[in-house]
Amino acid sequence: MADAASRLTTLAEDLLGVPLPVRVRAWDGSEAGPPGDVPVLVIRSRRALRRMLWKPGEMGLARAWVAGELDVDGDLYEALDRLAGFLWERGADAKDPVHALRDPRVRAAVRGLVKIAGPWPPPAPPAEEVRRRSGPLHTKRRDKEAISHHYDVGNDFYELVLGPSMVYSCAYWTDGGTLEEAQRDKLDLICRKLGLKEGDRLLDVGCGWGSMAIHAAREYGARVVGVTLSTEQAAFARKRIAEEGLTDRIEIRIQDYRDVRDGPYDAISSIGMAEHVGAVRYREYADDLYALLKPGGRLLNHQISRRPEPDETAYHVDEFIDAYVFPDGELAPIGRTTATLEEAGFEVRDIEALRDHYALTLRQWVANLEADWARAQRLTSPGRARVWRLYMAASAVSFERNRIGVNQVLAVKTPESGASGMPLRPRRWTGGGDR
């Protein structure tokens, strides 16, 4: 087909009802779209069209991206921001294809795209896609499988992306700091918020590769139990702990948080883990952590949030994230999180929003991935590396545009006397004074 890009652009604009915000480069080398220095959406194969027609919206785009049939030439962040309007901000017709197909121009555009796309059916989904699971959400077995899908893809791969800190949550940035320094500052901030001191028992829920446990034990003298469902994380964490000479202070368990029974603890940290809990289990999560704390003990819950929906029953999990990144992961508005913690008995004492910090962190992780791209593909798979690049870049844009946020919630199991043990100036820890 001669000049496939012009044909595609015309048909796509007829279908969407708006001009394309990016240029298009087709498999025949032709280009079309808005002039100037704008990102180019590269369609390497007609298979990408079949995927997008079969699964309109972000899922079809994601499958084509993961398969390597779709790429971006130019600034990936700008391309995602420009394309986001089609996925997040368009009107009812974009969400109701049956209604849209009542328009003769739309029907003609679909027929034209089908003709260009070639033989049906579309290719099978990429191997990296989680097949749809049945049964109740957030059982212990299903959660373990979901965690394994995301975290057991190779410690070397994660070390390439995350850097030496091996911290997989947003850093705490100051002007001119490095990623390693910002992650250290985040861990130290959490320790200060928890008021850790020599000999305190800390439970680190979702302990990852052991960074929080090591920092709390080495810098504050805490005795730490870290729990994770990832066998690869646990092995890596135990090795690091042995190298640090901290095996007498830190225990790493492959254990569901629901099975921890050896409280009470002086403090609990949950950093980037609660997104896996799910709405149906969140009160249970809050109740369990409350029961594991001693009176006066503190919980630091570090969790990604979403904007509230006008109709909360309309909320649905992001298809791409569910299928390729965090199976069964769910986000909740910060108000719901704090309300549930207080319903469980906690007193919420401080909330700190770190949305801007996460955008900076994600951009650094993407830069690490892109800087050693060939090795990243060897360490996992080309498709998996493309999944991580897309999800981290898209997440950075989402944080920058305030579509999602992240918050540290400090809560206390206030004793019956009402004496919380908290400093009178709640933000004293930002200066390092609450030790």
Image: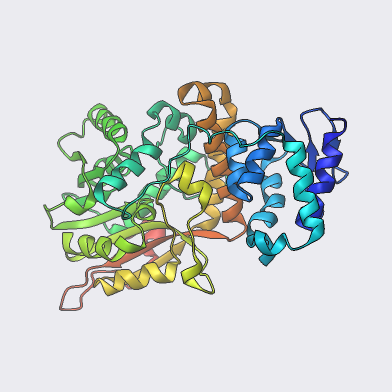
* Residue closest to the eye, 380 or 47: 47
> Is the residue 228 above or below the residue 412 in the image?
above
Q: Is there any visible trace of residue 227 in the rendered image?
A: yes
* Residue closest to the eye, 305 or 301: 305
> Is the residue 352 above or below the residue 260 in the image?
below
> Is the residue 424 above or below the residue 175 in the image?
below
Q: Quadrant of residue 288?
A: bottom left
Q: Quadrant of the C terminus?
A: bottom left
Q: Quadrant of residue 26?
A: top right
Q: Is residue 64 left or right of residue 353?
A: right
Residue at horizontal 51 percent and vertical 53 percent from the top:
318
Residue at horizontal 15 percent and vertical 77 percent from the top:
416
Q: Is residue 372 left or right of residue 352?
A: right
Q: How is the image coloured?
A: rainbow
Q: Position of residue 400 (x, y in %)?
A: 61, 55
Q: Quadrant of the N terminus?
A: top right
Q: Is residue 263 left or right of residue 189?
A: left
Q: Position of residue 46 (x, y in %)?
A: 71, 33
Q: Position of residue 334 (x, y in %)?
A: 43, 67
* Residue closest to the eye, 399 or 17: 17
Q: Position of residue 200 (x, y in %)?
A: 18, 52
Q: Is there any visible trace of residue 91 in the rendered image?
A: no
How many marks can you see?
0
Q: Residue furthest left?
A: 262
